[in-house]
Amino acid sequence: MKESLPKFDSTFSIDCVVFGFDEGELKILLIERNEEPFKDWWALPGNIVGERESLDQSASRILRELTGLTNIYMEQFYTFGDVNRHPQGRVVSIAYYALLRLGGEKSLKPMSNYAKQAYWRNVKDLPKLAFDHQQIFEKGLEKIKRRIKHQPIAFELLPEKFTLTQLQNVYEVILNKKLDKRNFRKKMLSFGVLKDLEEKQQGVSFRAATLYKFDKRKYAKLFGKEISF
Amino acid sequence: MKESLPKFDSTFSIDCVVFGFDEGELKILLIERNEEPFKDWWALPGNIVGERESLDQSASRILRELTGLTNIYMEQFYTFGDVNRHPQGRVVSIAYYALLRLGGEKSLKPMSNYAKQAYWRNVKDLPKLAFDHQQIFEKGLEKIKRRIKHQPIAFELLPEKFTLTQLQNVYEVILNKKLDKRNFRKKMLSFGVLKDLEEKQQGVSFRAATLYKFDKRKYAKLFGKEISF
DNA sequence: ATTACTTAGTGTAAAACATACACGCTATAT
DNA sequence: ATATAGCGTGTATGTTTTACACTAAGTAAT
């Protein structure tokens, strides 16, 4: 039975563009490779898909190994399959982006086997990347630029409780343009998916802003209608 | 060198959701399988990716073998990789949608090896499909629904010269809702990407409509601005 | 030639939405 | 007390979207 499938010297991997937002900057996680090919180069975190793993499971595993976190927001966005993208053989790579709350504690586990360590790097200042990872990163960034206009993904980059200014910053840094404060607030609040927590920021050195949280229940009720920026 | 990549009993394939528009209906191409597994079932056209083929090349090849046509508009949209999606082994499938002008001549080549014949089927009346092809189809349809709102893909389904009513029909059948004629025309013409050919339809049994064509040059100049429906 | 039929093609008013724009308020730090 | 820095707010204008119905033109049948 199994014999009827052609067998090539080929396999598939997952690569992840892991976005985080910190101090007003959009960052991604990069690893420093510890193995050939591209030893000592910077690369996107990724790995070969296990024999008994679905693609989503594999991506989750990679993120867990990398950050210790589960339940990270994650989405498959494109598959890269040029014949020579990997110098050691035919490796088709399924790319995911992930968005996560980078809450001060930038504690990343020391990496196993193939990588020395992972670091957050500002997307505006990336080093040269291994394989076709530059291309993968660019496509991932493009995808979240589109998606943030219609889907409530910005919240994935923020802590549970956030201020409107922080939210606006996320939009600005991803869309790469300044937005008008009053218009942004008016529109964002008009969707009715933010819950005013009647609570102020703590520990800021000037006037504290009101905290909000994203209200998933209310968002679910919008079903059909689209948020748009 | 090559030995450092883990080898599983796995491979990858392409599956294509080929959309056509004819007589006011949105159709897709299905093949009747002539091989196990799922012998005699309906399925999306697809095939194993060749050892020296990129994914796009492989998809083009499948479409060429199926329709005899090259230069079909085509786009990768998702990769399906559940462990058990293929009963004979681990087959990850990269899915493409294609849009083509179904101009009366529904002449499809008789299929080689794995399929008896291909047929156009209305998307509103599809048979049960092999593998996870129902899921693939649904995701493909969803994608073109989104994409037609922002990208000029409707033209790919129409002949070079078309009437505004035909164009509106494409939108209506893909978005699955009626649109207002006057508003549709106003908006569509306002983008300035349709060239009035100052020429009327031939051989219709009532008042002939003006023919237009999509003007790629002008569309290219819009770069940045977005068409939206 | 007349008539019946079918689709083409057209405008406007009201509502909703997007944009542009600037200053007083408040909590903190000194 | 005062300086500071970010918070929070409203309006007027322009643009876009929506809802809505009839006449014009060409063909076919008689």
Image (cartoon, coloured by chain):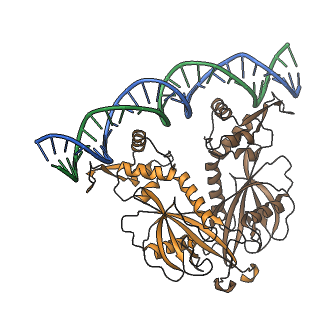
Chain colours: A brown, B orange, C blue, D green
> Percent x, y for residue A48?
75, 71
The quarter in which the N terminus of chain B is drawn is: bottom right
Seen in the image, is B137 located left or right of residue C24?
left
- Asked whether residue A150 is in view, the answer is yes
Seen in the image, is B189 located left or right of residue A151?
left
Please say if C22 is above or below B35. Answer: above
Give the quarter of the image for residue C26: top right
Closer-to-camera residue (B167/A205):
B167
Residue at 51 percent of width and 50 percent of height: B176
Residue at 70 percent of width and 47 percent of height: A153
> Percent x, y for residue C21?
58, 25
> Percent x, y for residue A227?
63, 41
Please say if A67 is above or below A168. Answer: below
Please say if B224 is above or below B89. Answer: above
Seen in the image, is A49 located left or right of residue C10?
right
Give the quarter of the image for residue A158: top right
Seen in the image, is D24 located left or right of residue A4?
left
Residue at 71 percent of width and 68 percent of height: B82
Closer-to-camera residue (B196/B89):
B89
> Percent x, y for residue B155?
42, 56
Closer-to-camera residue (C28/A98):
A98
- Asked whether residue A128 is in view, the answer is no
The total number of labels drawn is 0
